[in-house]
Image (cartoon, rainbow, N blue to C red):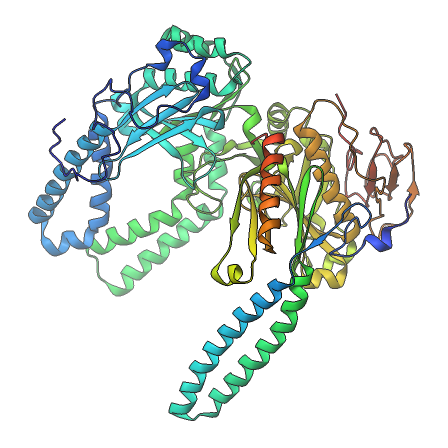
């Protein structure tokens, strides 16, 4: 009987001794914050127009709520990005993410159908990319955002190579 | 080729001559590395057409759809003659369109690929690699039965709908082609390429002898089928629904033919599902063909016969509906990747039945046949810890998961009890998800994803147990994928075996250097606290309190063969 039970019982840290988690780039925080702020500004602007035209106090309440929500979510974003992690093991790729709902995916390389590397305009501006591994199961969820392009293409190449190596289809 | 229909000059410039039976597709010849090995006669096979009657059958189908779309309302508005005229014009248009479609549709087998070209305005030329073939179904709708034709549907992975239905061929042609495609699909390139080419050379004769040596497995009695469908909620609601409608008419006093017809049409969609089920599953027969594949035949108005190679079975599901419990009946479902219709949509069109209705003994024998080594009677599951009651106040007793040497079993459901059996070899990925409430309670849910979309689900397990479960699933899936040698690149000896919280006495029985076997007391089980019988050198066996379990296969490692 081994002892690490108490250590292992953490939703984000399974098998701490065998799995070396790698974080995603902290620049992803900036990207996410910019997106969030942009959305909040749009919302606030819309509400402000409503307030200017009508002057009801509900509009002000709306603006206040949007701002508070944006600030709150920004704090969450910082932690959420830090919670993203992935690990390459011999046979499978592990991806974990989520704060409120915590998720861990274990996807064997052998089951890989294809790999996506995507980068939106904002992500490109910050030198980030997203790698997603697809299997035949729609539910499989192995998406890793916020990777530097070099790391993204390394991961893609490695996944493809491993996938070819151990491919077994279905 | 002079086609009467609209033929835009642009798109068809893919180099595809409109039809021309023996013109090889100029578009995509080079691929198919396997075709190099094929004999030249096979490689240069002419492109074939569908049966000449198919445009008419297609047209008939479309006309029915059109009439339904125009509905009774239109009929009442425009009068019968005009209605007939509109239908006639549309019918002629549809038939002409179908004929053009027929002229441009063709298929051919090139090496280990089936190539199908079709489309009138948007030409499409697709190659289906046969090693990706999941199952082949031969369908004969009513009209096709009258004319001796059949539709061949190939199930491949990817895409929401059945790819490439070849409709229609003569029955003989269709079954020959099916045999051939399955033969090509079944053999790996190096293995029996010669044998694969054989049926092609022998032609219909060889293919037609095959069904003679089929081994019948079971036949579902039509009486049972009808009774089982009477025992559904819909059947119980049917009289109520009818009474409701009649009441409405009586109260409103508007007895127009149109009104009644519309209401009946609307009701039929919802309430007549049992009837459709009966028609669909009529005369359900199962057999094994000489190559060990599963042959399923059913249907009254539309007969279907599908052949499923056993290694394409992704999962098996069993359902015990509440109303069937008095009879002890259950329903078995076969999950195959690529079947049209995701869960929920198109319930009727799906053909994934393994057993529409049957008693437990039948189902047990059948499961044993489909998933060798899996005995439905001894699939022990263990429930989640007691504190999961907060999340499942009523149904906690009926939730459970179990690991047997071959499969991952999960079951749930208070009224309709369900069981989902996933062979390790078919696992696509494993997920652990923990929601906020689960985090408070220290629980997590483990999903075992298969290619069909339904996942095996271990709901609300103790977190530590969930980790062990996830690791164990991943590990077993890996070994099931590569049955060859037991490699030594194992994980660290950190094989964590944690008692399911809430289970009392923990007696660790350690037999291997890295073993941790924890056994809780089993309530209602035959053999009391089990001694951790462990086979592999790296086992972690955790047994929570087992609920009415009869064997100790939970958590046991698969036998290395």
Q: Position of residue B13 (x, y in %)?
A: 23, 35
> Could you tell me which residue is drawn at 37 percent across and 19 percent down?
B109
Q: Please tell me whether residue A24 is drawn above or below residue B162 in the rendered image.
A: below
Count the marks.
0
A122 to the left or right of B316: left
B95 to the left or right of B207: left
B550 to the left or right of B6: right
**Depth check, front residue: A11 or B554:** A11
Q: Position of residue B63 (x, y in %)?
A: 20, 39
Give the quarter of the figure containing the C terminus of chain B.
Answer: top right
Q: Position of residue A80 (x, y in %)?
A: 65, 64
A138 to the left or right of B383: left
**Location of residue A102 by image quarter:** bottom right
Can see residue A148?
yes
Q: Please tell me whether residue B353 is drawn above or below residue B444 in the rendered image.
A: above
**Depth check, front residue: A141 or B243:** A141
Give the quarter of the figure containing the N terminus of chain B.
Answer: top left
**Depth check, front residue: B381 or B431:** B431
**Depth check, front residue: B244 or B299:** B299
> Could you tell me which residue is drawn at 20 percent across and 45 percent down?
B67
Can see residue B329?
no
């Amino acid at each position: 009987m081994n002892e690490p039970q108490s250590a292992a019982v953490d939703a984000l840290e399974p098998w701490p001794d065998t799995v070396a988690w790698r974080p995603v780039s902290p620049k992803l925080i900036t990207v996410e914050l910019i997106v969030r702020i942009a959305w909040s500004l749009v919302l606030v602007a819309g509400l402000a127009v409503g307030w200017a035209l009508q002057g009801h106090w509900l509009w002000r309440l709306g603006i206040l709520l949007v701002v508070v929500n944006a600030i709150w979510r920004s704090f969450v974003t910082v932690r959420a990005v830090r919670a993203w992690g992935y690990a390459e093991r011999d046979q499978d790729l592990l991806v974990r993410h989520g704060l409120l709902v915590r998720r861990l995916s274990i996807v064997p390389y052998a089951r890989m159908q294809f790999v996506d590397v995507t980068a939106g305009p904002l992500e490109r501006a910050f030198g980030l990319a997203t790698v997603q591994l697809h299997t035949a199961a729609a539910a499989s969820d192995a998406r890793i955002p916020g990777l530097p392009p070099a790391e993204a293409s390394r991961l893609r190449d490695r996944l493809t190579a491993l996938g070819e190596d151990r491919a077994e289809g279905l | 080729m002079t086609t009467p229909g609209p033929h835009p000059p642009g798109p068809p410039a893919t180099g595809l001559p409109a039809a021309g039976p023996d013109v090889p597709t100029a578009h995509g010849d080079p691929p198919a590395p396997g075709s190099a090995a094929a004999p030249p006669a096979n490689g240069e096979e002419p492109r074939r057409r569908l049966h000449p009657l198919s445009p008419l059958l297609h047209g008939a189908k479309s006309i029915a759809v059109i009439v339904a779309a125009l509905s009774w309302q239109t009929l009442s508005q425009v009068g019968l003659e005009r209605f007939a005229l509109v239908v006639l014009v549309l019918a002629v248009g549809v038939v002409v369109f179908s004929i053009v479609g027929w002229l441009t549709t063709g298929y051919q087998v090139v090496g280990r690929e089936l190539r199908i070209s079709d489309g009138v305005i948007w030409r499409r030329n697709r190659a289906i690699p046969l090693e990706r073939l999941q199952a082949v179904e031969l369908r004969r709708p009513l009209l096709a039965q009258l004319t001796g034709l059949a539709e061949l549907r190939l199930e491949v992975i990817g895409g929401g709908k059945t790819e490439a239905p070849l409709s229609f061929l003569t029955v003989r042609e269709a079954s020959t082609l099916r045999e051939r495609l399955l033969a090509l699909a079944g053999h790996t390139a190096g293995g029996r390429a010669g044998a694969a080419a054989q049926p092609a050379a022998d032609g219909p004769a060889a293919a037609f002898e095959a069904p003679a040596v089929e081994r019948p497995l079971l036949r579902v009695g039509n009486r049972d089928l009808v009774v089982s469908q009477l025992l559904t909620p819909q059947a119980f609601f049917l009289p109520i629904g009818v009474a409701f409608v009649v009441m409405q008419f009586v109260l409103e006093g508007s007895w127009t033919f149109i009104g009644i017809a519309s209401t009946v049409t609307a009701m039929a969609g919802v309430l007549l599902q049992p009837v459709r089920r009966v028609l669909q599953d009529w005369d359900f027969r199962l057999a094994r063909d000489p190559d060990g594949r599963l042959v399923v035949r059913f249907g009254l108005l539309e007969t279907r016969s599908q052949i499923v190679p056993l290694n394409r079975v992704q999962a098996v599901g069993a359902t015990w509906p509440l109303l069937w419990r008095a009879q002890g009946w259950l329903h078995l479902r076969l999950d195959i990747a690529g079947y049209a219709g995701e869960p929920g949509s198109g319930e009727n069109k799906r053909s994934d039945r393994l057993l529409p209705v049957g008693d437990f003994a039948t189902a047990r024998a059948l499961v044993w046949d489909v998933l060798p080594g899996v005995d439905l009677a001894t699939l022990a599951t263990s429930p989640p810890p007691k504190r999961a009651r907060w999340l499942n106040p009523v149904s906690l007793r009926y939730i459970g998961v179990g690991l047997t040497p071959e499969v991952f079993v999960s079951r749930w459901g208070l009224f309709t009890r369900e069981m989902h059996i996933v062979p390790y070899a078919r696992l696509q990925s494993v997920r652990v998800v923990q929601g906020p409430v689960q985090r408070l309670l220290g629980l997590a849910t483990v999903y075992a994803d298969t290619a069909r979309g339904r996942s095996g689900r271990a709901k609300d397990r103790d977190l530590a147990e969930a980790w062990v479960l996830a690791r164990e699933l991943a590990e077993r899936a890996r070994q099931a994928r590569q049955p060859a040698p037991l490699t030594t690149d194992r994980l660290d000896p950190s094989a964590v075996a944690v008692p399911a919280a809430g289970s009392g006495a923990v007696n660790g029985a350690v037999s291997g250097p890295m073993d941790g076997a924890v056994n809780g007391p089993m309530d209602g089980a035959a053999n009391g606290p089990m001694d951790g019988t462990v086979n592999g050198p790296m086992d972690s066996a955790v047994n929570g309190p087992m609920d009415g379990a009869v064997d100790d296969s939970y958590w046991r490692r698969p036998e290395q063969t």
